[in-house]
Amino acid sequence: MQKAKEILKKVFGYEGFRPLQEACIQSVLDRKDTLLIMPTGGGKSLCYQIPSLIFEGLTLVVSPLISLMTDQVRQLRALGVETAVLNSSLSEEAYEENLAAIRSGRARLLFLAPETLLKSEILELVSELKVDCFTIDEAHCISEWGHDFRPEYRQLSRVRAYFPKAVFLAMTATATPRVREDIRKNLEIAVSNQLIASFNRENLFYEVIPRANPAKQTIDFINRFPDQSGIIYCFSRRQTDELAEALQQKGYRVKPYHAGLPMETRAKNQELFIRDDVQIMVATIAFGMGIHKPNVRFVVHYDLPKNIESYYQETGRAGRDGLPANCLLLFGYGSIQNIRYLISQKTSEEEKRIATMHLNSMVRYAESHNCRRIPLITYFGQEYGESSCAMCDNCANPKVAEFDITESAQKLFTAIRQTGHRFGAAHVIDVLRGAESQKVLKFSHEKLSVYGTGKEYSGRQWNTLLGQLIQQDYLKQDHEAFGAIKMTPKCQDILNGETSVFGFFPPKEEKSKAVKKAVTAAEFDDSLFQILRRKRKELADEANLPPYVIFSDKSLIDMAARLPQNKEDFSGIFGVGAKKLESYGDIFLGIIRDHRSNLKVTAN
Ligand code: ADP
Ligand code: MG
Ligand code: ZN
C-alpha cells in the first residue's frame, strides 16, 4: 500500500485516496476477486490503474463503449502510463502498434471491447501473456436486470480460464441489489468481497422548481454558470431540437443530441462538448453513457425523468471532478402526462404497474419538502443519516407551512366533486379559473356553480396548491383512471369547515429562492483562471485532446489560488504528477509569473 500511495502522488498528483479506493486496491493487490460499487465520479478507475502499475504482468480492462476506452487511454497516456487498446475503431497501423506494445511487455494496461476479447486470436494472444488483473468496467452490463445489458458481457466469466492467475475486479455505478447479485453470481465473486461506497454525491446541489416558463427558467439558471459546461435533458427529440435552436438564437453555444440525429452528427456534437467547443448539450436520455467529462457544472431536467434511478444517473454526470455542481429539475404536471402516455403504450400489465410505481416515486420526490438526498439515497438501499444536507433547495431554504390555504382547498375540492371525480388536474383547474376550453364546453362545466370561482390564482399556482394537497394526503391522483384527481376521506373535515389546512403556498408566482450563485471553491484569481483555461484549450487543440486531459478545472483553480512560483510549488498542485510537471510545468509557471508581474505593474 505504501507503493500505491507513492503512485497516487507521483503519477496522478493526488494527495489522498477517496473512500473505498484504498480498500479496493488492497483487495486487488491481495488477489481477492472484488466487486466495487461506487457512484459516478467516485473514482473507480484508479482502483485498477494503481494496481496495474504495481503488478508485474498486464492488466486487462473490458469496457463496453469505444468512447469510454478512448477517454481512459488518452488520460493514462497523458500521465505517462504505457497503455494499449484494441477495438474495431483502430486503423490497421494503430492496431499493429498496440499489438507490439502488448507483445513487448511495455504496456501496463490493455483496454478491450468485450467482443474483441472474445475473438479467438485475441484470446490466444493474451493467454500467452502474464495477466495479473482482469477488470470489467460497467459490470452492470452483465445483468439482464440492468439498463444496458450486453450479451457478450455474459461470456466474460468463461474467458477467465485463459488466464487463471489473474484477479477479477468488476466495477459499476449502477447497481440495485438485484443487479449486484447477478454480477456476483456470474463472476463467482463472494459477497464478502463486495465493496459498496456511499451513494451520496456530496458536491451536487439538488433543486426543483415548478415548471412555469421553462425556457426562461432554464436561461435564468444557465446564466448563473457563464461559460461552464452543462447538460439539459429533454423528454422528446422535438423538444430537444427546439430548445437547442432557441438557445442558439440567444447566443448560447449549444448542440442537440438525440437518437434521431445521424450517427456522425451525434459523434461530432459529443466531441465538441467534450472539447469545450460548445458549452451546453441539449439532449434526450440517449446522451451520457459514454461521457466522462469531469467538469460538467450543471444538469437541467427540462422535463420530469421517468424514475429516480434515471434522475440519479443523469444528474450524476455533473461534478465528477468533485467540485460543486448544480442539478435543476423543472417540475410540471404536464410532464407526468407525457410519461403516463408512454407507460400506456407498454404491452405487459406488470411493466405498466412497475413503471407507474416508479413514476409515482419520482413525483413524490419532486413534490417533497424534505431533504432531496433522502429519496435518492434510500433508493439504493442505503440510509441517509443526516437531517439536513445544506446542499439541496429544501435544506438550504427550509419552508414552513405557514399559509392558511383552507379556503382555496375548499374550492378545489368542490370543483373535483362537481365535475364527478373523474378529471385530471388540468381540467379541474380550467373549471376553477373559468376557462372556455373545449372540454369545459363539451361537458357543460361552465354551468357549474364552482365555475370561475378561482380566478385569483394562475393555473400554475393552482397546480402547486394541488400538489401540496396531494402531499398532505387530501387528494390523490388515480393512476388507473388516467390521472383523475380524487379526494380522500380526510377532505370532509375541511369541507365542513371543522379543520384548517396549512400549506407552503405563497400566493405570488414562485421564484426560485435557491442559492443564486454556484457555490464556488476556495478564493482564487478568476482572471488568471480564465487565462489558464485559454492556454489549456490551445494546448489541447494542438495535441488533439479534450482540455481536461491536459489539466482538470480543479487543477487550474488550484494554480489560480496558490500561484506556484517554481517547479516544486507546481508539483504540489492538485493533479500534477511527474509527467504533467515535465510536459506543462514551464508553460503554466510562465503564465502565472507573467500574470503576477502584470498585477504588480498595475498596482504601482
Ligand atoms: P468513476 O469511474 O467512478 O465515475 P473516475 O475514475 O472517472 O470515476 O474518476 C472521477 C474523477 O475523480 C477523475 O477526474 C479522477 O481523476 C478523479 N479522482 C479519482 N480519484 C481521486 C483521488 N483520490 N483524488 C482526487 N481526484 C481523484
Ligand atoms: Mg468509470
Ligand atoms: Zn437536503
Image (spheres, rainbow, N blue to C red):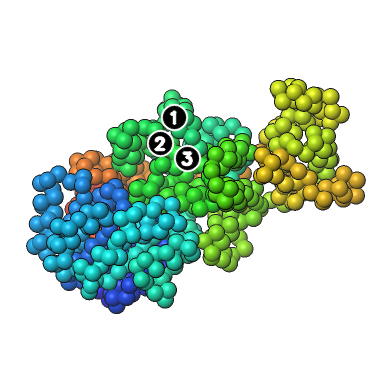
Quadrant the C terminus occupies: top left
Do tag 1 and tag 2 residues touch (Cβ < 8 Å)?
A: yes
Using residue 145 as the reference point, say whether residue 388 is left or right of it.
right
Residue drawn where x is 37% and y is 72% of the image: 189
Q: Which residue is mark 2?
A: 258
Mark 1 and mark 3: Cα distance apart in space: 11 Å
On the image, the x and y values in percent for residue 185 come to 39, 68
Question: Based on the displayed image, in which of its 4 quarters is residue 532 positioned?
Answer: top left
Q: Which residue is mark 3?
A: 233
On the image, the x and y values in percent for residue 478 come to 70, 44
Mark 3 and mark 2: Cα distance apart in space: 10 Å
Q: Nearer the viewer, residue 14 or 26?
A: 26
- First along the sequence among labels 3 and 2: 3
Q: Nearer the viewer, residue 285 or 269?
A: 285
Reply above or below: 443 against 58: above
Residue drawn where x is 42% and y is 64% of the image: 182
Q: Which residue is mark 1?
A: 241
On the image, the x and y values in percent for residue 192 come to 42, 76
Q: Amino acid at mark 3?
A: Tyr
Q: Amino acid at mark 2?
A: His
Q: Is residue 97 visible?
A: yes
- Label 1 sits on a secondary structure element that is helix
Q: Nearer the viewer, residue 391 or 597?
A: 391
Crowdedness near tag 3: few (<14), some (14–19) or many (≥20) residues, C-alpha within 10 Å: many
Q: Amino acid at mark 1?
A: Asp
Question: Based on the displayed image, in which of its 4 quarters is residue 527 positioned?
Answer: top left
Residue drawn where x is 48% and y is 63% of the image: 178
Q: Nearer the viewer, residue 528 or 598?
A: 528
